[in-house]
Amino acid sequence: MRDVGAIPVTAPARTLLDNAARLPARELADAVELAQVKRLVTKRDIAAAIQRSPRRPGATALRALLEEPAFTRSLAERKLVALLRAAKLPEPLFNADVEGFEVDALWPRQRVALEFDSYSFHATRSAFERDRRKSAALTRKRYIVLRTTWRELTAQSHLLIARTAEALALSAR
C-alpha cells in the first residue's frame, strides 16, 4: 500500500484480492473482467498478488477464477465457451499471443483465431487499422482469422458456431 496525497491506495490486483472474499462469485468475475478490459491488471498481476498473500481470505476465490480452464476477460468470451461446449467444439485458448499479436481466441493446432469486434474498443481509426494489420499478418502466416460481433454472438450464434466449425474443419485438412 502507498499513499497518494493523504489517501492510502493499493494496486488493482491487490484491491481485487482484498475484496474477493466479500464479493459473490459472479461479481468477483465481473470485477476481474472489468479490471482487465480497462487494462488495470493482467492474469499475471493477479497471480502475483495471490502469491504474495496466499492466505488472505479472498485468495481461494480469486485463485479459482485464475485456474478455471476458460478464464476469460469478457462476457463475450464466456458466452463463446458456452456455445462451443453446447456444439461439442474444442475450446480455444483465450487472450493468446500468436505471431506477435494477442488474439481473443485461438485454436493453435488448427491455426484458427477468432476476434471480437466490439464497437467500444474498435471504433477509432487506429484500432480499425491495427485490426486489419493483425488479420493480414496472421493470414500471411496461414491462420484463418474469424471476426465476430456481439450481435452475431448473441442473436445469430448458430451462424458463428457454423463458421467456427467450418474453419476448424478446413484447417484440419
Image: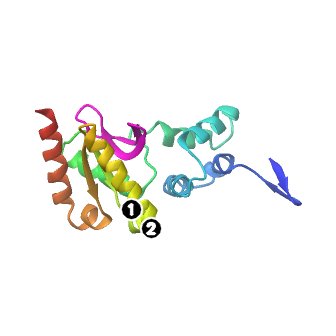
- Mark 2 neighbour class, 10 Å CA radius: few under 14, some 14 to 19, many 20 or more: few
* Residue 168 showing in the rendered view: yes
* Residue 112 showing in the rendered view: no
Q: What's drawn in magenta, residue-wise?
A: 91-112
Using the numbered discs, state the Cα–Cα distance from disc 1 to disc 2 in whole angstroms. 6 Å
Q: In the rendering, at what x and y percent does residue 108 appear?
A: 29, 34
Residue that mark 2 sits on: 124
| Residue drawn at 55 percent across, 56 percent down | 31
Dot 1 and dot 2 residues touching (CB under 8 Å): yes
User: Where residue 128 is drawn, which disc sits there?
Assistant: 1
- Mark 1 neighbour class, 10 Å CA radius: few under 14, some 14 to 19, many 20 or more: few
Q: In the rendering, at what x and y percent does residue 38 appear?
A: 55, 58
Which residue type does callout 2 highlight? Thr
Q: How is the image coloured?
A: rainbow
| Residue drawn at 39 percent across, 59 percent down | 129
Examine the rendered structure and indicate whether residue 115 appears above or below residue 155: above
Q: In the rendering, at what x and y percent does residue 29 appear?
A: 50, 52
- Give the camera-side residue of 128 and 68: 128
- Give the camera-side residue of 147 and 32: 147
Q: Quadrant location of residue 94? A: top left
| Residue drawn at 23 percent across, 38 percent down | 142
| Residue drawn at 61 percent across, 49 percent down | 20
- Give the camera-side residue of 88 and 165: 165
In this rendering, position of residue 12 left or right of residue 35:
right
Q: Quadrant location of residue 51? A: top right
Secondary structure found at label 1: helix
Q: Residue furthest right?
A: 6
The chief SS type of the magenta part is strand
Examine the structure image and report whether residue 73 is included in the region drawn in magenta.
no
Which residue type does callout 1 highlight? Phe
- Give the camera-side residue of 101 and 81: 101
User: Where residue 170 is drawn, which disc sits there?
Assistant: none
